[in-house]
Image: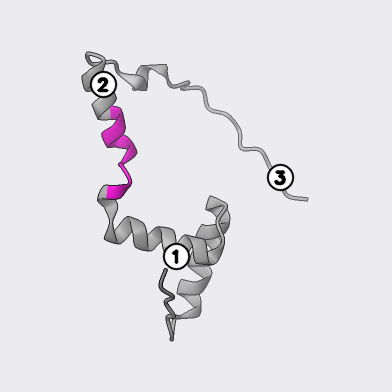
């Protein structure tokens, strides 16, 4: 695999990537790889909407939306 170095990234961009990585459970480096893969090779990872559409077509039009629980649930506060 090749290595890539990016210079002169603003602190705003760096912080946004770090935040996004934390939310997705990836390292900052892993998040950057994920973003590049999604942007440059989107055909390698199917879009979830496309997967559901293919499922609906194969199953004769099953609508998954009807299975979703519509009740509103309060967010759980995990701050210490």
Query: Which residue is located at x 23 percent, y 19 percent?
Result: 58
Residue 41 location (% of width, % of height): 28, 56
42 relative to 5, above or below = above
The secondary structure that dominates the magenta segment is helix
State the mark number for residue 56.
2
Please tell me whether residue 70 belongs to the stretch shown in magenta. no
Residue 28 location (% of width, % of height): 53, 65
Distance from disc 1 to disc 2, alpha carbons, whole Å, reads: 33 Å
In what quadrant of the picture does the N terminus appear? bottom left
Residue 71 location (% of width, % of height): 51, 22
The magenta segment: 44-52
Q: Pointer 3: what residue?
A: 78
Secondary structure at numbered mark 3:
loop
Horizontal arrangement in the rendering, residue 58 relative to residue 45 (left or right):
left
In terms of depth relative to the viewer, which is nearer, 77 or 8?
8
Residue 51, by quadrant, is: top left
Residue 79 location (% of width, % of height): 73, 49
Pick out the residue farthest to the bottom.
8
Query: Which residue is located at x 42 percent, y 80 percent?
Result: 6
Q: Earlier in the sequence, mark 1 or mark 2?
A: 1
Give the number of marks. Answer: 3
Query: Which residue is located at x 69 percent, y 42 percent?
Result: 77
Q: Pointer 1: what residue?
A: 32
């Amino acid at each position: 695999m090749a290595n890539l170095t990016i210079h002169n990234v603003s602190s705003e961009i760096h912080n946004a990537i770090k935040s996004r990585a934390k939310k997705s459970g990836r390292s900052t480096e892993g998040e950057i790889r994920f973003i590049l893969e999604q942007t440059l090779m989107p055909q390698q990872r199917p879009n979830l909407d496309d997967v559901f559409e293919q499922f609906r077509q194969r199953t004769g039009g099953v609508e998954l939306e009807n299975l979703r629980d519509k009740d509103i649930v309060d967010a759980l506060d995990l701050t210490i």
